[in-house]
Image: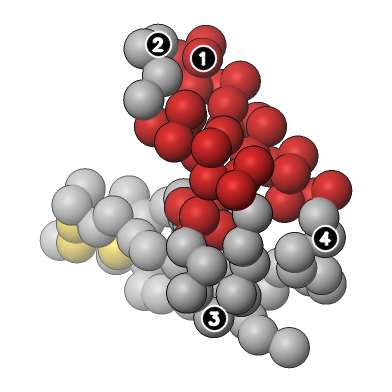
Amino acid sequence: MIGHAEAWDIGIYANPNYYFQYDSQEFRDAYAKALKAPNESEKAKWFGRCQEIVAEDAVNGFLFLSPSISAMKVELMNWWQNYPTIALDCTEVWWKK
């Protein structure tokens, strides 16, 4: 079992040398089309297809998503309360004096 969850990691499935060792030409083709899509609608279509391929091929077994519970001083302002990723943008965080 590997605790692997990253924002925007769909591209790793296009790399057969990644530790998943997933090798699908259909996925690589869909991913390439998504990256070269001329507009957001086409991007959504092809990235959606990428997700379908990964699910159909059962590349990984999803068990759960670990909760992210933060504890901090009340003076810390503008921290994301329900942040969607483990990578945090702290450029808007500040201390209340």
Residue annotated with mark 4: 58
Q: Is residue 69 visible?
A: no
Alpha carbons under labels 4 and 3: distance apart: 15 Å
Q: Residue at x 50, y 55 (%)?
A: 14
For the residues bearing labels 4 and 3, Cβ distance under 8 angstroms: no
Crowding near the residue tagged with mark 3, few <14, some 14–19, many ≥20 C-alpha atoms within 10 Å: few
Circles 1 and 2, Cβ within 8 Å, touching? The answer is yes
Q: Which residue is labeled 1 in the image?
A: 42
Amino acid tagged 1: Glu
- Point out which mark residue 39 bears: 2
Q: Tell me the distance, in whole angstroms, between the alpha carbons under discs 1 and 2.
A: 6 Å
Alpha-carbon span between mark 2 and mark 3: 32 Å
Q: Amino acid at mark 3?
A: Tyr
Q: Mark 3: which secondary structure? A: loop
Q: In the rendered structure, are the residues bearing label 4 and label 2 in contact, judged by CB atoms less than 8 Å apart?
A: no
Residue at image position (19%, 61%) is 95
Lateral position of residue 29 relative to residue 65, left or right? left
Observer-side mark, 2 or 3, equals: 3
